Image (tube, rainbow, N blue to C red):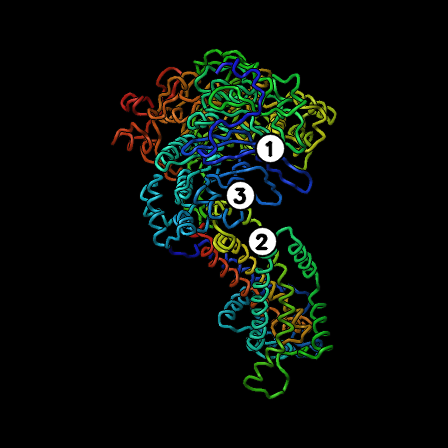
């Protein structure tokens, strides 16, 4: 795998393996969508092969063409507007142009698919068992009763407890993780040879994601399945993939064995993706390496390299000709970069900041800006469409926190743990049931607009958090106008300043939100939050809806702004690596309570609470072989309902080290285990020693 | 799984009933002018004080308002709506005479428009964006904008006047002495034009809802899942699309029943059809307030019953709305 071997090899990249050995053989695939206003070239010139029992990862950001390529393998793209050309051979049979009747026989029997959103991918009006048995009824002529029996076996196989009693449930009666298990059972029903998994874990929590990854690996061995795993998450890829193709702008940028992709990266885009995600196994740096700009949407026929404008290696020849995949190493390692010989295993194209100092003391930093004491937020339960309220959801159930000036408090936890409600209570969007929130010593004011100047919020989805009818300038100016901060002239000036501060051109103010990409829109949201000069900004999953290559830009922007203004940040996220990168102190939430709170480096180096340990163990490292999956503790099951939290320690139902009789009866208090380190666990703080 | 309406829902229905009855009670009493003038006509000035008192007592206006209100509730429960100002007949009898005719034509037109709207809407959605779809869509929009009296008169002038195929008015041929099958046909032939008119007018609403609902369903992820399993078009359509599509349509149909009763006022008048709508028209032109009140109560009851039916039906279609 030397650079020398790759130099000069300019012959068109070819698959070295024999075609007959391949289960799936895609050659020169192109898909274009002819829309009324424009033609989108979603996929061009994609060639790849998948061998039997192999795990092939197709990696890319949204719009890179990864899902579209695989949907065309299933013949599931509607024509019009989709037009597919090239060749897709499944066990030697050509899929493109195959009559609908034959295609139908392949779907679900030879190739099955698992989708991203298990809730919306299951029919809400049919029982789970019926949906699992459906392909058996279609392809194998099973009777209703036989299909149901087989569905029970399959549900049992994918780890649904007491499958015979769950087979007649409806999808809404399953939890998110169980639904995805049911989807996998459905895909396995006819024992297909190829399983296409389209972002199957993206909508799931990290602990459930780990369970699903394990499950797919198990059934893959058992059924001798080939798996094509479509994802944007390089961590998951490193954990499961044999071979990888990285897609950009509808083309394959780099392909090869997982090992080669991660260790001997030969495309600047792949290396950018790998460098721009924060990693738990590396020291925290002041800045993340960021890829400038945003992913390309291809409408015109490309003339040069699609990555040209964002690439640090861009130079001679890049804009003149479309780069072809070339052999750059052993084991069919190909790169579509004409400058790939300038890269080596140790080269660093992307600049990162320096390693930051250790964050140890929680009391460090400025004075306390926000002080939360005994906060509870309970919501009445309204189930179904019109069941009357009976219980309460204890979204936040007794939280004490301080946020200091110039510091970032990270809040992590699985979905449903109450972290978003906590954030909303902070900006007075929900009223606490109990407890106090003081901002600079004054209790928060729920009369509209009063305290909202000093606490501002950045939401997860910048697309829906902005009025599409307003111009960007007005979006940013609105807080200034609401709080009457200046004359129209002053406001105009302030808006230009803010646009410059978040890295947008001044004329952006005259345009509408839909004219901007996701990353740019999140910049606008940052500018809006900054406008009224708040003391605290609450960021609720600010980067999770953004493309991987853009996340780093927003994370860096927030860091820059904090450095410049000394503002306090509350950073709410499910991504432990991102939280580690941005935070000074981290609080871990479980079922409405904080189970552990500690300075960042201590928490990540030596987590004390079993839940924190399990969360950290579930995060895949974006490097093959770094983590040995077999030795990791896996959390079982899903988050219990916050309506009826378990007695005693709320985590005891899933805790691998719970002590019978103690953890299930006595609720542990959040206690200082070491200076600055607060944990609520009987095993860390034995009950006799707890100070109230 | 047991299904029942919960207490809150039933309370909502109760509140609606109380509000409707109370408004019905208050409205005529809020009218300006002396009620005696309404009851006895302009000659009321010629009556002696005793005669006046007797009339006031007969219609129950001699007691305080709250007693009148309680008595009104009592009357409703005993089915006593009082007497018509104009004909002096018991209003209950008048309503019982008219109700079957209205139920006949609204019932038939609801069935026809529901079937037509659902089928045409499904075809339109299945062939979305094609000429068939766009043609049907623009046709339905045009029909939607037709005034009902104009459509009724157009049909009369074509089928009754021009071609003489069908009768233009009444529910039966007056004094014909027909019996048996001939009588049945007489009723049917009289009902055809009003039913057709009402059906044509009600179809676009059902069609639009059906088309929109089905387009939504077709775009759902689980339809893609069904196709990925190898389900054919027929299986996708009847196994996965149909039931998910029909749920919102049922709600709209229930609301339509209210419109259908309201729509009979004009259509029954155009066809001189002896139903409730025509009764309302007569009562309005004759300022026959007690009749109007009673008819409105019947309309309210019909809307509530239809909504109740939709509420009971919905959980059968969509398991997510079931109470465990």
Sort mark 2 into few (<14), some (14-19) or many (20+) by Cα contacts within 10 Å.
some
A107 or B220: nearer the viewer: A107
Quadrant in which the N terminus of chain B is drawn: bottom left
Sort mark 3 into few (<14), some (14-19) or many (20+) by Cα contacts within 10 Å.
many
Question: Same subunit under labels 2 and 1?
Answer: no
- Residue A225 falls in which quadrant of the image? top left
Q: Distance between the residues labelled 2 and 1?
A: 30 Å
- Residue A670 visible (yes or no): no
Classify residue B104 as left or right of residue A401.
right
Chain holding disc 1: A
Residue that badge 2 annotates: B126
Q: Which of the two discs, 2 and 1, sits closer to the camera?
A: 1
Query: Which mark identifies residue A44?
Result: 1
A555 or A273: nearer the viewer: A273
Residue A289 in the image: x percent, y percent?
55, 18
Question: Same subunit under labels 2 and 3?
Answer: no
Query: Which mark identifies residue A75?
Result: 3
Q: Please say if B155 is above or below A539.
A: below
- Residue A486 falls in which quadrant of the image? top right
Looking at the image, tell me whether mark 3 or mark 1 is earlier in sequence order.
Answer: 1
Q: Distance between the residues labelled 2 and 3?
A: 19 Å
Chain holding disc 3: A
- Residue A653 visible (yes or no): yes
């Amino acid at each position: 795998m030397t650079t020398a071997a790759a130099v000069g090899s300019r012959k068109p990249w070819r698959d070295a393996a024999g075609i007959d050995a391949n289960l799936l053989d895609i050659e020169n695939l192109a898909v274009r969508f002819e829309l009324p206003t424009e033609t989108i070239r979603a996929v061009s010139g994609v060639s790849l092969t998948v061998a039997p029992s192999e795990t092939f990862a197709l990696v890319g950001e949204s719009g890179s063409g990864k899902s579209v390529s695989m949907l065309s393998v299933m013949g599931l793209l509607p024509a019009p507007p989709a037009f597919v050309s090239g060749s897709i051979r499944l066990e030697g049979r050509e899929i493109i142009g195959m009559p609908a009747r034959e295609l139908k026989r392949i779907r679900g029997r030879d190739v099955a698919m698992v989708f991203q959103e298990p809730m919306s991918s299951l029919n809400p009006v049919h029982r789970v068992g019926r949906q699992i048995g459906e392909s058996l009824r279609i392809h194998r002529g099973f009777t209703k009763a036989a299909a149901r029996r087989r569905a029970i076996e399959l549900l049992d196989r994918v780890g649904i407890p007491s499958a015979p009693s769950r087979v007649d449930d409806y999808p809404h009666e399953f939890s998110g993780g169980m639904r995805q298990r049911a989807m996998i059972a459905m895909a396995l029903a006819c024992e297909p040879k190829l399983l296409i998994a389209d972002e199957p874990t993206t909508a799931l929590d990290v602990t459930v994601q780990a369970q699903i990854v394990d499950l797919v690996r198990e059934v893959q061995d058992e059924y001798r399945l080939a798996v094509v795993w479509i994802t944007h998450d390089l961590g998951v890829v490193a954990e499961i993939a044999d071979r990888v193709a990285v897609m950009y702008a509808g083309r394959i940028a780099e392909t090869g064995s997982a090992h080669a992709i991660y260790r001997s990266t030969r495309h600047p885009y792949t290396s950018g993706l790998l460098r721009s995600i924060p990693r738990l196994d590396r020291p925290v740096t002041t800045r993340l390496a960021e890829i400038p700009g945003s992913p390309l949407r291809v409408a015109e026929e490309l003339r040069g390299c699609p990555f040209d404008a964002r690439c640090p290696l861009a130079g001679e020849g890049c804009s003149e000709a479309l780069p072809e995949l070339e052999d750059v190493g052993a084991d069919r390692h190909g790169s579509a970069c004409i400058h790939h010989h300038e890269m080596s295993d140790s080269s660093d194209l992307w600049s990162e900041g320096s390693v930051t100092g250790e964050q140890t003391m929680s009391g460090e930093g400025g004075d306390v800006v926000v002080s939360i004491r005994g906060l509870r937020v309970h919501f009445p339960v309204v189930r179904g469409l019109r069941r009357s309220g009976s219980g309460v959801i204890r979204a936040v159930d007794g939280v004490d926190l301080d946020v200091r000036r110039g510091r970032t408090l990270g809040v992590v936890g699985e979905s449903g743990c109450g972290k978003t409600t906590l954030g909303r209570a902070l900006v007075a969007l929900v009223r606490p049931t109990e407890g106090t929130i003081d901002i600079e010593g004054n209790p928060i004011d729920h009369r509209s607009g009063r305290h909202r100047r000093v606490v501002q919020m950045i939401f997860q989805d910048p697309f829906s958090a902005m009025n599409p009818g307003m111009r960007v300038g007005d979006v940013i100016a609105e807080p200034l106008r609401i709080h009457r901060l200046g004359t129209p002239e002053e406001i105009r000036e302030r808006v230009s300043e803010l646009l410059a501060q978040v890295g947008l051109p001044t004329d952006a103010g005259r345009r509408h939100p839909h004219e901007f990409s996701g990353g740019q829109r999140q910049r606008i949201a940052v500018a809006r939050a900054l406008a009224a000069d708040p003391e605290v900004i609450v960021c609720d999953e600010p980067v999770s809806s953004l493309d991987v290559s853009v996340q780093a830009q927003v994370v860096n922007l927030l860091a820059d702004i904090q450095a410049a203004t000394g503002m306090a940040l509350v950073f709410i996220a499910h991504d432990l690596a991102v939280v580690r990168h941005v935070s000074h102190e981290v609080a871990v939430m479980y079922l409405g309570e904080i189970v552990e709170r500690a300075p960042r480096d201590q928490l990540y180096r030596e987590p004390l609470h079993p839940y924190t340990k399990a969360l950290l163990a579930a995060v895949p490292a974006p490097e093959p072989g770094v983590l040995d999956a077999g030795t990791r503790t896996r959390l079982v099951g899903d988050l219990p309902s916050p309506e009826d939290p378990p007695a005693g320690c709320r985590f005891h139902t899933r805790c691998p080290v719970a002590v019978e009789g103690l953890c299930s009866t006595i609720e542990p208090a959040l206690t200082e285990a070491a200076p600055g380190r607060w944990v609520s666990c009987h095993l860390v703080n034995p009950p006799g020693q707890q100070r109230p | 799984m047991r299904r029942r309406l919960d207490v809150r829902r039933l309370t909502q229905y109760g509140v609606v009933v109380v509000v409707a009855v109370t408004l019905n009670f208050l409205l005529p009493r809020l009218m300006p002018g002396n009620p005696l003038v309404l009851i006895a006509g302009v000659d009321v000035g010629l009556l002696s004080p005793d005669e006046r008192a007797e009339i006031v007592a007969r219609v129950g206006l001699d007691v305080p308002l709250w007693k009148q209100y309680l008595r009104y509730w009592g009357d409703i429960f005993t089915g006593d709506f009082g007497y018509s100002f104009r004909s002096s007949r018991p209003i209950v009898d008048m309503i019982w005479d008219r109700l079957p005719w209205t139920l006949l034509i609204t019932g038939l037109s609801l069935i026809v428009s529901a079937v037509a709207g659902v089928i045409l809407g499904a075809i339109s959605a299945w062939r979305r964006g094609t000429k068939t779809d766009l043609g049907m869509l623009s046709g339905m929009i045009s029909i939607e904008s037709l005034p009902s009296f104009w459509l009724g008169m157009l049909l009369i002038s074509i089928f009754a006047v021009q071609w003489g195929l069908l009768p233009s008015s009444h529910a039966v041929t007056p004094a014909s002495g027909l019996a048996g099958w001939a009588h049945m046909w007489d009723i049917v032939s009289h009902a055809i034009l009003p039913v057709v008119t009402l059906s044509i007018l009600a179809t676009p609403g059902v069609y639009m809802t059906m088309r929109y609902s089905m387009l939504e369903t077709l775009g759902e992820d689980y339809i893609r899942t069904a196709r990925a399993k190898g389900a054919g078009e027929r299986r996708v359509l009847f196994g996965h699309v149909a039931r998910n599509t029909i749920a919102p349509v049922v709600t709209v149909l229930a609301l339509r029943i209210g419109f259908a009763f309201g729509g009979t006022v004009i259509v029954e008048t155009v066809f001189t059809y002896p139903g409730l709508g025509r009764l309302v028209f007569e009562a309005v032109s004759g300022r026959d307030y007690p009749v109007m009140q009673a008819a409105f109560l019947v309309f309210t009851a019909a809307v509530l019953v239809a909504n109740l039916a939709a509420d009971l039906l919905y959980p059968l279609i969509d398991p997510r709305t079931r109470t465990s």
